[in-house]
Amino acid sequence: MSLPVPAPAFTGPARCLLGTLSSRPGLFVLSGHPESSRLSHYFLAAPLLRGEVVLFLDAANCFNPYRLVVFAEQCRRPPAQFLGRVRISRAFTCFQLAELIERTPAAARRFRARRVVVAGMPDIFDDEELPAAEAKAAFTRSLDELRRWPEQGLTALIFSDAPPRLSPLGTWLRGELERQATEAYRLEESPAGLCLREAKTREVEHGTHGRDFSPADRADPGALRQVPARPAPRRPAGA
């Protein structure tokens, strides 16, 4: 087994946000980094420490059990304790991932899991050998399934790698995914470490659902602070 390349460290506020996202139902998208999928292992920490089972749908061929072994040793826990709580399913085509997404609610009930990591989406749907219309149709069906997960008490953490060049299909896929997400974040490196920049929150009638984060200190680009949510646009009188 090859040793993993060390990943950049997350800032303190980012680590807190990681734990928050992994503890409540919703559809959360994390992208913008060339190795976003590889960084998905950090999101396993909080639920595993809580003793939860996590489903991991790997469409990026990124899962490395060695990272969990290292994490378990750092926490002074038996590695088997963490490894036994992660249920891995791999997909090598968009159709395989679509089938896994469809079967996930049943698997979650079977293993009593509430947290699901999906790595490599929508990347795997951006296939040059597949007609765009066919890829869009398969992706739309999967997205419809994902939208129902929070209603069933599931947390979906979706990781998308930033490609060297974004195709028109890839642009459409990412736009649709973020549009349906509860919240979307960009994984960005800074001098202070890896941080999460909020890209989108789902809007509701009386403002935004969720929190906005912005740089708190110019000397620390990775620092985040909570700022007031944006108010909803005021409707004209008589509208």
Image (spheres, helix red, strand yellow):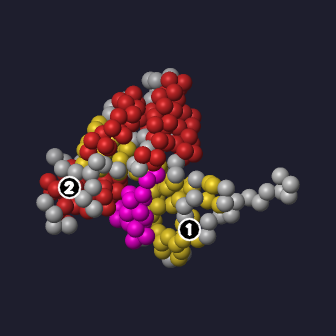
Three-letter code for the amino acid on which mark 2 is drawn: Phe
Query: Any mark on residue 201, and which?
Result: none
- For marks 1 and 2, the one nearer the N-term is 2
Of 84 and 131, nearer the camera is: 84
Residue 162's spot in the image, x, y percent? 46, 46
Magenta-colored stretch includes residue 13: yes
Residue for point 27% across, 41% down: 110
Residue for point 35% across, 50% down: 114
80 w.r.t. 223: above or below = above
Residue found at the very far right of the displayed protein = 238
Q: Quick one: SS at disc 1?
A: strand
Residue 44's spot in the image, x, y percent? 30, 56
Three-letter code for the amino acid on which mark 1 is drawn: Ser
Residue tagged 2: 82
Residue for point 28% across, 48% down: 112
Magenta-colored stretch includes residue 79: no
Q: Which residues are magenta?
A: 7-26
Residue tagged 1: 214
